[in-house]
Amino acid sequence: MKDALMFGLKAFFSGCLGCLGALSLILILAVILSLVFGSQVIGGVSTFLQSIPGILSQNLSSITGGAPGGSPTMGQVPPMEVYLTIGNKPDAKHITSFSVAQSKQVYFWVQPPKETSITFSLLITMPDKSQIQFGPDFKSDASGKPVNCGQFGDMTPPAGNYKLEAFPKGSSSAAGFIEFKVTK
């Protein structure tokens, strides 16, 4: 009986040490990959992690027979206009190009459909093709007024081509987007 107990304890602790070794190897590989590939890996991982709720909600809705992700029926997303202005004025001239020096004055806007309250997020595609969520989740009211989604803030954007997309909460399809260019 004593030998069986000792064998069980050895097996238990060997399993624990094996799991710790495997976890250490995974962490070391993650550090090495992030050092070698830098922001590409981190951007890809963050994009993947942000897509998990959408993937899960689509899979759960297909099991229950509901609309994917809680989006409107028939897979339709309400159209939203995404645009940029110089200055904090939603009715100012819409722009699609500006210089790095002007970036602190550029505001991002989303015009939702009237009589619809929508929670949405913005996804920005950078010139290096990495994608990040721009700001927090935003919410429109039923008035249909443009939603001020902020600006680059303290970040000085690198020159290049960008894409800004609005995704209603629970939808994997963009309801609107704008492509714009930042020049030197």
Image: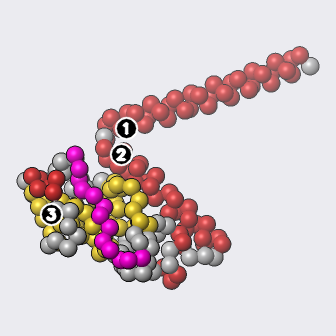
Q: Secondary structure at mark 3?
A: strand
Q: CA distance from mark 2 to mark 1?
A: 7 Å
Dot 2 or dot 3, earlier in sequence: 2
Residue type, label 1: Leu
- How many C-alpha atoms fall within 10 Å of the one at disc 2: few (<14), some, or many (≥20)? some
- Residues marked 2 and 1 touching at CB (< 8 Å): yes
Q: CA distance from mark 3 to mark 1?
A: 40 Å
Q: Which residue matches tag 2?
A: 41
Q: Which residue matches tag 3?
A: 86
Residue type, label 2: Val
Task: Confirm whether the magenta stretch covers residue 123.
Answer: no
Q: Main secondary structure of the magenta part?
A: loop
Find the magenta span and give its range. 142-154
Q: Position of residue 57 (x, y in %)?
A: 56, 65
- Residues marked 2 and 3 touching at CB (< 8 Å): no
Q: Judge whether 156 appears above or below 86 on screen.
A: above
Q: Which residue matches tag 1?
A: 33
Of marks 2 and 3, the one in the foreground: 3
